[in-house]
Image (cartoon, rainbow, N blue to C red):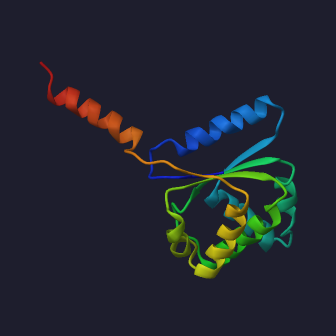
Amino acid sequence: MIFLGPPGVEKTHLAIGIGMEAIRSGILVYYISTVKLIQNLKRDYQTGRPVYKLRTYNKFPLMIIDEIGYLPLNKEESNLLFQFVSYWYEHNSTIFMSNKSYSEWGEILGDEVIASAILDRILHHSTTVNIKGESYRLKERKKWVYLIQNRG
């Protein structure tokens, strides 16, 4: 499953809710940001254990990967993400969240070919949920600003 939408529309909240229901059903779940996932994979690759972290993650039937596209990835990082997706593909379930449309993934991954290969695998057995709307955090802030400005 992929949740797409601007910041603040509760993509993470929805994914965590699904993750909590999975846990209640006895399914092991792992939540991680894309940046942390890449850092972990990079560290294991640099220490000569490139498959170690992949095997560790494989213990979790459901993985929730947040914030794809919040920070751009360089070529090495995009390659690591591709290796992860290729390894994970068709073996376990994943929920991805991104604030970028699929057409922007080439830009954030720094390589159109890698982005296309990653999306090919991710989209093969998935459902995309596009969430539109204004940030809940900004709505709340606007409400408070309005109340403060209109006191009395």
Furthest toward the left, the residue is 152
> Residue at 48% of width from left, 52% of height from top?
5
Task: Give the side of residue 6 with respect to residue 27, left or right.
Answer: left
* Front-lying residue, 93 or 55: 93
Residue drawn at x 34%, y 34% is: 140
Relative vertical location of residue 101 with respect to residue 27 in this rendering, above or below:
below
State which quadrant residue 50 falls in: bottom right
Q: Residue furthest top?
A: 152
Judging depth in this view, the residue of 105 and 124 nearest the camera is 124
- In percent of width and height, residue 69 lies at 53, 63
Give the x, y percent position of residue 122. Answer: 69, 62
Along the line of sight, the residue nearer the viewer: 21 or 72: 21
Question: In the image, residue 62 lies at what x, y percent?
Answer: 77, 47
Image quadrant assignment for residue 82: bottom right
Task: Report the residue at 62% width, 74% height from top.
Answer: 115
Q: Is residue 148 placed above or below 40 in the rendered structure?
A: above
Residue 137: x and y in percent read 39, 39
What residue is shown at x 70% (from left), y 76% (from top)?
Answer: 79
* Figure quadrant of the C terminus: top left
Numbered circles on residues, count: 0
16 vs 55: above or below: above
Q: Is residue 142 left or right of residue 104?
A: left
